[in-house]
Image (cartoon, rainbow, N blue to C red):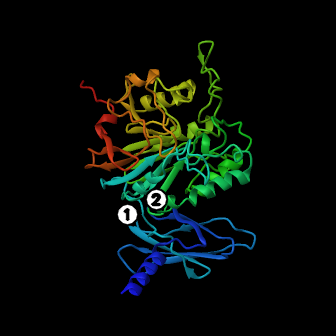
C-alpha cells in the first residue's frame, strides 16, 4: 500500500511539474478570431520545438507547427498559429526535440468573437506594475507574487497588461542584453506561467519596462527596447516602416482596444504645455504620427466601446505632471476630435500610479469620460492620504484603493444596452469594489428640438 502511494505521488509530480528544459511557456500573446501568437522558451540544448493544438472539446489535434533553432540561437521562439475558428477554445501541447514537455499546467486560449455586432459576453483581466524580486533581493519594492496565482484561476478571455509589466534594474536598462535578461527572468517566474498560458495577453509599456525611470523618447536604447517589446508581446500589426513605435489595436466582439505607446515619442514632463498664451505643440506625449493614427482609427471605429489603453493616467485634473492632460496640445486635440466628430464609447484604461481609482470628467458639450487606473499588481503601493488627490472631486466615490490589486472587466448586455462591469479585487482575489459603465453613459445626449 505504501509503495502504491509513493508511486502515485511520484506520478502526480511527474504529470504536474514543469519540464526541466522548458524554461517558460507556452505563453499566449496576441489572439484574434482566426490566429494566435504563442511564445515558447526552451533550454539551449533543445534544437527542435513544436506545438500542437486542438479544440478543447475534442481529442483530435487540429494542427501543429515546428521550429528548428539555429545552433547558436538559444532564445525563445514565436509560433504564429492561423486558420482558427472564432469564439473557440483551444488546448496547446509542446514537444522538445520530439518528446512531450509538460509545463505544469494546461495551456489553452479562446479566440475572439468575430462579429462586431455581437452581444456575446466576454471578460478580461487588467493590471499594471509588476515587480518580481530576484532571489536574494531584499523585499523592499516587490510585494507577494501570490496575486498572480489568484488571477490565473479566474476564467477570462484575455488579459491587458497596463505598463510597468516588469521593472528594469539600473544595471539592465543601459544594454540590450540587460533588457532581454529582465524579460526572460520575468517570463520564467513560476507564477507567471499559468497566468500567461491560459488566455490571450496584450500589453502597453511604461517607463520601467521601457528604460530608466520617467524616460522619454531621448532614451538611448529606445529602438532596442521597442524591438524586445515587440518580440515578447507579439501583435498582428505594430507601427510599420521607419516608425519603431509599439502602438497597435485589436478588436474583440463589439469592442476595440487602442494600445498606446507613451514613451517612444514623449517629451520631458517639465517642458511647459503653454508658451506665451499658446499651446506648446512641441510638448509631445504620443507624437504626431501616433496621435494621427489614434484620431483616424477612432473615427473609423464602429465599436460599442473604444478602449484607449496607456501606461499613465489620461484625464485626471489633479494628477501629477506625467498625466496626458498636462500635454496640453495633444490632449486638447484628442478631446476636440472626440467632441466635434461625435465619437461615442471612449473609455480610458491606465496604470502607473501605484493605487487604483476611477476618474470621471465631462467636457463641455460631451459625455462622461472615464479613466480607470489599476495599479499595482506587486510593486509597492502608494498612499495619497496627505496629498491634494485624497479628496479628488473627479474620482467616483468608493473607488480609491491603495493596496496591491487587479481588476476583471466584463462586457455584457444586449445590443444597444451593453455594459462594462469593473470589479477591483485585492491581492487574494477578494472583491473590493465594482462599478458599471453603461453604453448610454458614453453617448452624446440627443437634445429634443
Q: Is residue 252 left or right of residue 321?
A: left
Q: Residue at x 69, y 43 (%)?
A: 170
166 above or below 435?
below
- Crowding at mark 2 (Cα within 10 Å: few <14, some 14-19, many 20+): many
The residue carrying mark 1 is 87
Question: Sequence-wise, which precedes: disc 1 or disc 2?
Answer: 1
Relative depth, front residue between 107 and 31 = 107
In the image as oriented, which residue stretches furthest toward the top?
A: 276
Question: What residue sits 36% from the left and 53% below the top?
Answer: 123
Quarter of the view holding residue 265:
top right
Position of the C terminus, as image quadrant, is top left
Q: Residue at x 73, y 51 (%)?
A: 176
Task: Kindly tell me whether residue 331 is visible in this rendering.
Answer: yes
What residue did someone put label 2 on? 195
Please provide percent x and percent y for residue 223: 70, 47
Q: Is residue 154 left or right of residue 80?
A: left
Q: Quadrant of the N terminus?
A: bottom left
Q: Are marks 1 and 2 in contact (CB under 8 Å)?
A: no
Residue 156, relative to residue 66: is it above or below? above
Find numbered disc 2 in the image and state the secondary structure of the residue it sits on.
helix
Residue 105: numbered disc: none
Question: Dot 1, crowdedness within 10 Å: few (<14), some or many (≥20)?
Answer: many
Identify the secondary structure beneath mark 1.
Answer: loop
Determine the CA span between mark 1 and mark 2. Answer: 20 Å
Residue furthest front as drawn: 2
225 sits left or right of 140 in the view: right
Image x and y of residue 17, in percent: 49, 72
When the figure is inspected, residue 293 is found, relative to residue 398, above or below; the finding is below
**Where's residue 373, x and y in %?**
44, 37
Amino acid at each position: 500500500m505504501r509503495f502504491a502511494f509513493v508511486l502515485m505521488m511520484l506520478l502526480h509530480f511527474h504529470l504536474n511539474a514543469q519540464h526541466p528544459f522548458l524554461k517558460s511557456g507556452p505563453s499566449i500573446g496576441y489572439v484574434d478570431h482566426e490566429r494566435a501568437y504563442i511564445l515558447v522558451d526552451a533550454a539551449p540544448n533543445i534544437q527542435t520545438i513544436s506545438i500542437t493544438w486542438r479544440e478543447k472539446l475534442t481529442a483530435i489535434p487540429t494542427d501543429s507547427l515546428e521550429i528548428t533553432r539555429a545552433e547558436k540561437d538559444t532564445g525563445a521562439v514565436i509560433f504564429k498559429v492561423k486558420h482558427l475558428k472564432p469564439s473557440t477554445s483551444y488546448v496547446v501541447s509542446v514537444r522538445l526535440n520530439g518528446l512531450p514537455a509538460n509545463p505544469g499546467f494546461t495551456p489553452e486560449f479562446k479566440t475572439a468573437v468575430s462579429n462586431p455586432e455581437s452581444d456575446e459576453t466576454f471578460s478580461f483581466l487588467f493590471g499594471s506594475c509588476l515587480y518580481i524580486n530576484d532571489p536574494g533581493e531584499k523585499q523592499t519594492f516587490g510585494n507577494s507574487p501570490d496575486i498572480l496565482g489568484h488571477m490565473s484561476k479566474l476564467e477570462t478571455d484575455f488579459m491587458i497588461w497596463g505598463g510597468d509589466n516588469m521593472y528594469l534594474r539600473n544595471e539592465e536598462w543601459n544594454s540590450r542584453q540587460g533588457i532581454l535578461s529582465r524579460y526572460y527572468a520575468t517570463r520564467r517566474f513560476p507564477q507567471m506561467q499559468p497566468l500567461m498560458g491560459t488566455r490571450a495577453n496584450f500589453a502597453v509599456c511604461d517607463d520601467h519596462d521601457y528604460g530608466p525611470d520617467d524616460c522619454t523618447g531621448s532614451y538611448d536604447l529606445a529602438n532596442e527596447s521597442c524591438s524586445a517589446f515587440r518580440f515578447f508581446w507579439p501583435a498582428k500589426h505594430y507601427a510599420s516602416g521607419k516608425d519603431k513605435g509599439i502602438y497597435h489595436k485589436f478588436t474583440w466582439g463589439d469592442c476595440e482596444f487602442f494600445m498606446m505607446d507613451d514613451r517612444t515619442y514623449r517629451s520631458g514632463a517639465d517642458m511647459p504645455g503653454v508658451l506665451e498664451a499658446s499651446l506648446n505643440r512641441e510638448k509631445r506625449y504620443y507624437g504626431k504620427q501616433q496621435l494621427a493614427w489614434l484620431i483616424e482609427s477612432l473615427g473609423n471605429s464602429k465599436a460599442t466601446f473604444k478602449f484607449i489603453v496607456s501606461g499613465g493616467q489620461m484625464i485626471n485634473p489633479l494628477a501629477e505632471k506625467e498625466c496626458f492632460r498636462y500635454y496640453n496640445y495633444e490632449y486638447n486635440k484628442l478631446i476636440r476630435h472626440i467632441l466635434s466628430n461625435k465619437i461615442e464609447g471612449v473609455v480610458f484604461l491606465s496604470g502607473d500610479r501605484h493605487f487604483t481609482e476611477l476618474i470621471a470628467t465631462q467636457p463641455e458639450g460631451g459625455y462622461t469620460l472615464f479613466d480607470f487606473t489599476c495599479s499595482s499588481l506587486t510593486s509597492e503601493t502608494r498612499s495619497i492620504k496627505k496629498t491634494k488627490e485624497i479628496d479628488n472631486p473627479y474620482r467616483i466615490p468608493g473607488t480609491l484603493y491603495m493596496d496591491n490589486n487587479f481588476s476583471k472587466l466584463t462586457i455584457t448586455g444586449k445590443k444597444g444596452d451593453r455594459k462594462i462591469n469593473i470589479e477591483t479585487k485585492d491581492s487574494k482575489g477578494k472583491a473590493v469594489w465594482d462599478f458599471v459603465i453603461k453604453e448610454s453613459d458614453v453617448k452624446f445626449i440627443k437634445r429634443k428640438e
